[in-house]
Amino acid sequence: GAVVSQHPSRVICKSGTSVKIECRSLDFQATTMFWYRQFPKKSLMLMATSNEGSKATYEQGVEKDKFLINHASLTLSTLTVTSAHPEDSSFYICSARDGGDRGSPLHFGNGTRLTVT
Amino acid sequence: AQKVTQAQTEISVVEKEDVTLDCVYETRDTTYYLFWYKQPPSGELVFLIRRNSFDEQNEISGRYSWNFQKSTSSFNFTITASQVVDSAVYFCALSEPYNQGGKLIFGQGTELSVKP
């Protein structure tokens, strides 16, 4: 089945530094990837839609200058949390759809737990 | 606007009990897709099922079954003879229209705890 690999699984960084999270589709090409954020005991909040070769589409309230998304190839999207602060600590999950239509299920990476100290 | 509601925040059952997780959705689309995902304590999201709006047939997969009723906009999930390994958070999701990106809208999730 379709596999999405997300790296790193955990990262601890100091306040003010930047952190990059990678999301790769291993056995399929993904023109679109989605980045979600999940707070403890909460649902998944869509942050942005990453489109290969073009700018990401951000959801309302998500700071595009803080959460930089790059989708340089059909198998790789990256999320960079710039100048991280403790309130950015969260669980970040990427996903990709294997197939051209929205009926195809999203396959998720294993998530990245970011802790900003 | 699309919306998914999972009214049950937490459910606790004893092993071997049957349990039903409720999901109610709102959409103006005539064509849409519904999904269920499982999130175990390790955090990854596991795809369980997809159903399109034209297929109201119920589905059974082992101990799992799904009841899709368009008349009540519900897509409920039943686990028969629950096991401790079923303990997880379960999310119901609805796909947005394709011209809006086709992203998934998730419900709030139901945390299922199955005790031995």
Image: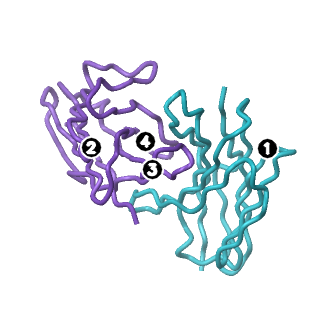
Chain colours: A purple, B cyan
Answer whether labels 4 and 1 touch (C-beta < 8 Å): no
| Residue name at image x 55 percent, y 67 percent | B87
| Discs 1 and 3 carry the same chain letter | no
Q: Are marks 2 and 4 in contact (CB under 8 Å)?
A: no
What amino acid is found at the position of numbered circle 2 in the picture?
Answer: Leu
Q: Quadrant of the C terminus of chain A?
A: top left
The chain ID associated with circle 2 is A
Pick whichever of labels 2 and 3 is earlier in the sequence: 2
Residue B105 spot, x, y in % from top left: 57, 38
Sequence-first disc among 3 and 4 = 4
| Residue B4 vertical position relative to residue A104 in the rendered view, above or below | above
Disc 4 marks which residue?
A38
Quadrant of the rendered image containing residue B77: bottom right
**Circles 2, 3 touching at the beta carbon (< 8 Å):** no
Residue linked to disc 3: A99
Give the quadrant of the N terminus of chain A.
Answer: bottom left
Q: Residue at x 73, y 29 (%)?
A: B28
Label 3 CA crowd tier, 10 Å (few <14, some 14–19, many 20+): some
Q: Chain of mark 1?
A: B
